[in-house]
Image (tube, rainbow, N blue to C red):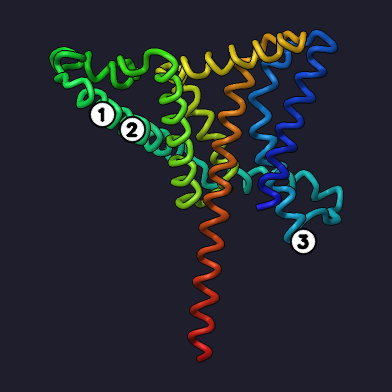
Amino acid sequence: MNTLFFSFFIAIGGAIGLVTLSKSFDLENFTTRIFPIIPILYAIVYETLERRKRGKGVKTIPPSQAKEEMKAGAVAIFQNITVERIIIIVGVSLLIKTGLEIISTGVYLSAGRMSFEEVYGPFGIETIGRFLRGDHPWLAGNQGIMLLALIALITGLGTGLWIGTTTKALPVLEGVIAGAAVTVLSTMTNMLVLYRTIENLAKQSAESFGYVFHAGFAVVITLQVLLYGLWSGMANRAMLKREALRTEKKARKSKK
């Protein structure tokens, strides 16, 4: 678990360093393009540290075999990460998010003693579209933003848990790739309001220290993707630990 958090903070440190350098050398446009790579680097750094920890770190490779080893390593890293798998993960994330919003809608209607048609109108294709976009009246105001943040947190945690417990690939890498797909799709829903709100808060905080940074949205999106990788890794580590404990218990029982 220490490796998981250590590599996460390395990625965060790299992002902070990138922001600082971009401001110093006036390269903010270039930085915005680089930021999406940080989550992938996070996954690679984590896997590298894990292999070193298991004693599979640096080894002597003849120059003639170096190219083949690199190709084999790249294939191994992305093994079992398929388009179908990413689509399924995105679907799971949408189901969790939509389910939470349906529950929130039910609470809102009950509290206001209103019927569904009074708020959303007659049920039809447009109603389905409103739910997919997340266009709900209970999201208005600061309380709505807080509720949206809670939905985003639970959706990310739930998706990360599902990835970590079902993956046959590298959990952190699959988490950041799936997280990127989910985040891109989320910018077409009510989550865009949350991202923009966080971006504005970050800008205001930076301006209060006399610092202006124009790549705030890229930072918010990158952090979201990094968290997907972190949660997926945590869920996978917890699952492996439980499996190891069950195996140990079975071994003890068999000896008795």
Along the line of sight, the residue nearer the viewer: 55 or 254: 254
Q: Amino acid at mark 2?
A: Leu
Badge 3 crowding class, 10 Å Cα cut-off, few under 14, some 14 to 19, many 20 or more, is: few
x, y (%) of residue 244? 55, 68
Dot label at residue 61: none
Dot label at residue 107: 1
Foreground mark, 3 or 2, reads 2
**Disc with the residue nearer the chain's start (1 vs 2):** 2
Residue named by callout 3:
55
Badge 2 crowding class, 10 Å Cα cut-off, few under 14, some 14 to 19, many 20 or more, is: some
Foreground mark, 3 or 1, reads 1
| Residue at image location 49% in from the left, 28% down from the top | 181
Residue named by callout 2:
100
| Residue at image location 48% in from the left, 85% down from the top | 253
SS type, badge 3: loop
x, y (%) of residue 2? 70, 51
The answer to which image quadrant residue 152 occupies is: top left
Q: Alpha carbon of mark 3 to alpha carbon of mark 1: how far?
A: 53 Å
The answer to which image quadrant residue 52 occupies is: bottom right
The answer to which image quadrant residue 237 occupies is: bottom right
**Disc with the residue nearer the chain's start (3 vs 1):** 3
Vertical arrangement, residue 115 with respect to residue 164, above or below: above
Q: Amino acid at mark 1?
A: Val
Residues at discs 3 and 1 in contact (Cβ within 8 Å): no
x, y (%) of residue 156? 47, 36
| Residue at image location 75% in from the left, 19% down from the top | 19
SS type, badge 1: helix
Along the line of sight, the residue nearer the viewer: 62 or 103: 103
SS type, badge 2: helix
Q: Amino acid at mark 3?
A: Gly
